[in-house]
Every structure is written in C-alpha cells, then in structure tokens.
Amino acid sequence: MNTQTRLVEVRQKVLKQNDVVARALRQRFNDAGVRVISLVSSPGSGKTMFLERVLTLLAKRHRVAALVGDLATDNDAQRLARSGAPVRQIVTGTVCHLEAQMVQDALEGWDLDSLDYLFIENVGNLVCPASYDLGEAHRLVLFSVTEGEDKPLKYPTIFNTADVAVITKMDLAAAVGFDRAAAHANILAVRPGMQIFELSAKTGEGLEEWLQTIESPQPVSAG
C-alpha cells in the first residue's frame, strides 16, 4: 500500500467519525431547541467583531452563547465576552479547523436548554473547515471587501458547504474600490441562489436585516 492511499484512508476514517459525532450533536441541539450557527472565514475578515456585535444585540432579547476556535490564545473569547454572553474558547493547537469532537468536549457541563442561539466561530481558514460538519443548523461564510471579489472563485468548496454569504467591512468598500456586482456574481457562480448579506460591524450597516433573518422561524438557506 502506498503512502498516498494510506493517507486517503486515514482521512476518510477521520471524516466518518466526525460525521458520527456531528449527527449526535445536531440531534442534541434540536432536542434542546437551540439554533446553532457557525462562522467560517479567512483571518482578518472581521468575523470576531461581527460576532461581538451580534451577541450584544441578540442578548437583549434572546439567550445566546458562543464557542470560539483558535490555534492559540483566548484573545477572541475575551473580546466576545464583552457582549455579556457566555463564551468558551477552543484552543486547537496545530489543527487548522474545529472538529465535532472539539465542540462536544467544549459543551461539557453546559445547559443547552438554557440557550436560544449558540454561535461557533471557526478557526480563520477557508480550506480545512469545509470538510468538517459541527452539527450546526446554519453555516455562514464571511469575506471582507478588503479581500477582493474573487474569494468565492478561489475557495468554492467552503461556499458550497455554507448556507449564507456575508460580505463584511462595507464601510471600506468605496475606499478599496470594491466591485459589489462582481462579488455577487462570483458567489452566485459558485453557489446559485445563495443568500447574500452586506454589512459593517463597525457602523452597524446591514446588521439588523441579518438579525431579522436569523430570528425568523424559517431557517436561512442557500435556496
């Protein structure tokens, strides 16, 4: 057996085990009545600032909490805790993504029945997280206007595994010459019918519209 074949078999086994744990998590979330939303993006997209604003606003009318993954430090968890919502950090070490088992371990002792929404912020990466189901109900993929309009074309897999695309840092769009029409066209070329939101966590532009969709009884979807 060659090395490449062996690596493929190991990867398939890992993903299969992840799916088993993810299915159990999804059932657990459904039983508790908590809507779980994961966020994926490259580093620097403004994901943590976005989630901090979301937690702060939603906490006024719902019971919310967050899990946040990072290779090292608990800096993001400290930032998110400023919202007043319960937050737990998952330190992945050398692993460039969250896995279902990590989420399950992080939830130990947490009463899910006391939550309406649980947000999971993945490690900043647009490649590895695409393969790992975390048991979430909805997955958001974020990219900022400063990253360029071609992100969906470069990383189609992550867009194909997400339910909604969120374009962040819209307050900088004019300054960086962001081509909104091209960005939308690229997203829809990869994932036809995908729901797209444009917002700025700094100014609040577009946040309420996104929150209204999340709070709707009908789940967000890619059409």
Image (cartoon, rainbow, N blue to C red):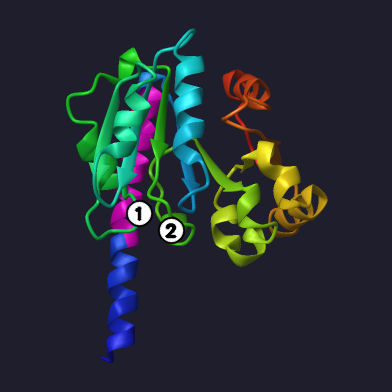
Residue type at mark 1?
His
Q: Residue at x 76, y 44 (%)?
A: 174
- In the image, taking residue 41 as reference, residue 81 lies left or right, namely left
Residue kind at label 2, given as amino acid type: Ser
Q: In front here: 90 or 26?
A: 90
**Which of these two is toward me, 71 or 26?**
71
Q: Which residues are magenta?
A: 15-31
Q: Is residue 30 magenta?
A: yes
On the rendered structure, is 56 left or right of 211?
A: left
Q: Residue furthest right?
A: 181
Specify whether residue 223 is in view.
Answer: no
Separation (CA) of disc 2 from disc 1: 9 Å
Q: Which residue is mark 1?
A: 97
Q: Is residue 82 magenta?
A: no
| Residue 210 lies in quadrant | top right
For residue 75, the mark is: none
- Residue with the most extreme front position: 175
User: Which numbered disc covers residue 131?
Assistant: 2
Can residue 125 be spotted in the picture?
Answer: yes
Give the residue furthest to the top: 61
Q: Secondary structure at mark 1?
A: loop
Sequence-earlier tag: 2 or 1 = 1
